[in-house]
Amino acid sequence: MASDRGYFITLEGCEGSGKSTQLALLNDYFKSNNKGVVFTREPGGTPISEDIRKIILDVKNLDMTDETEALLYASARAQHISEKILPAVNAGKIVICDRYIDSSFAYQAYARGLGFDFVSGINAFAIKNCMPDLTIFYDITPREAFLRKGGADEGDRLEQSGIAFHERVYGGYIALTEKFPDRIVKIDARKSKEEIFDETVGILKRRGIII
Ligand code: TYD
């Protein structure tokens, strides 16, 4: 990796995994350390990608086919990587993205059953091989996460898909950690948010991303 290039880090996990809490803690951490860090999210991150996000997550779009959904996530990602992520990483910044391609693998390939090769193929076209340098997976089963949270939200189409779907997503993530052992690092997300944050920062330090 060229020395002036930054880092592209993605955070992954099932709904209720505590990923958002860790993102908020990371935000505070980097603010107080005054580092050049870009926080972004998927689906979204650019105006076009945020528009696509609205279509995907709209509760009135329950008729959306699995293929349409997978292509829309990949479209949003194509715009996001070329308009925002790559320029920032190439300018030496650390980019921390809430979900990325592994969400498409876990949700569309494994849980919806579209298969790894199909989802990998459309995403290869979308992202032109721009894979994260590091992915942190917050590891907690959906059942444990839902119990901790006190039940599912009502408003969101994807959260209405039921526990069986989320169990398949979790299984997908576990398969991904085995498929990409160098890139994906697992943290036990059943721990306290402070312990999880310490481990998150520890991983960034071990990888030389922060001092
Ligand atoms: P969001 O409300 O941002 O969920 P979370 O807070 O859990 O990250 O909604 C994003 C939803 O989109 C979430 O259910 C995961 C799903 N998703 C996919 O199915 N495939 C993808 O490629 C991405 C990026 C997200």
Image (cartoon, helix red, strand yellow):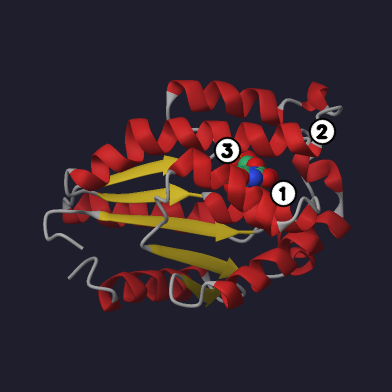
Counting from the top left corner in percent of width and height, residue 122 is at 60, 42
Q: Is mark 3 within 8 Å of ligand 1?
A: yes
Q: Check disc 3 and report its element: helix, strand or loop.
A: helix
Q: Nearer the viewer, residue 157 or 69?
A: 69
Q: Which kind of residue does numbered mark 1 sit on?
A: Gln
Give the x, y percent position of residue 11.
Answer: 48, 57
Q: Is residue 162 left or right of residue 7?
A: right
Is the CB atom of the residue marked by disc 1 within 8 angstroms of ligand 1's nearest atom?
yes
> Outermost residue toward the left?
4
Q: Position of residue 51 (x, y in %)?
A: 56, 21
The residue under label 1 is: 108
Name the quadrant of the N terminus: bottom left
Residue at x 65% of width, y 49% of height: 119
Binning the other alpha carbons within 10 Å of mark 3 as few (below 14), some (14 to 19) or many (20 upward) gives many
Q: Closest to the observer: 208 or 25?
A: 208
Residue 125 placement, left or right of 62: left
For the C terminus, the image quarter is bottom left
Residue located at (55% from left, 45% from top): 123
The residue carrying mark 3 is: 74
Q: In the rendering, at what x and y percent does residue 141 appear? A: 72, 69
Q: Which numbered dot is residue 12? A: none
Residue 183 visible in the picture: yes
Asked if the residues shown at circle 2 and circle 1 are in contact, with their CB atoms under 8 angstroms apart, the answer is no
